[in-house]
Amino acid sequence: MDSEAYLELLQKVTPRIRKCDIVMRRAITPHERVSVTLRVLATRRSYEDLQFSAAISPQVLGVIIPETCAAVYEVLRKNYLKVS
């Protein structure tokens, strides 16, 4: 995926996946969420393998990756998925 396509995807999904910071921790940014989700989809690596390169726990990856996949599906389905 080239950078232009990545930035377009990020712009489309950001409103659906952006979370607010709280007092106890900083929220995972939409960029981090999309990057790690694309890495999982491209490499099929386990969440345990990705925790070191992404610096996100496997438990949190188990939440944000399905959320991000659902957001990607929602924003792209009208233009890229056709039901016969």
Image (cartoon, rainbow, N blue to C red):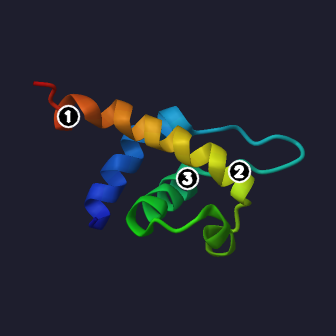
Q: Quadrant of the C terminus?
A: top left
Quarter of the figure with residue 48: bottom right
Is any atom of residue 84 visible in this view? yes
- The residue sitting at 52% across, 68% down in the picture is 45
Q: Is residue 4 above or below residue 11?
A: below
Q: Is residue 12 above or below residue 57?
A: above
Q: Identify the residue under disc 2.
A: 60
Residue 32 or 68: which is nearer the viewer? 68
- Whole-percent x and y of residue 59? 73, 52
- Whole-percent x and y of residue 78? 22, 28
Answer left or right for 59 relative to 81.
right
Q: Using the numbered discs, state the Cα–Cα distance from disc 3 to disc 1 in whole angstroms.
A: 23 Å
- Judged from the image, the secondary structure of the residue bearing numbered disc 1 is loop
Label 2 neighbour load within 10 Å: few <14, some 14-19, many 20+: few
- Residue farthest toward the left in the current orientation of the protein: 84
Q: Identify the residue under disc 1.
A: 81
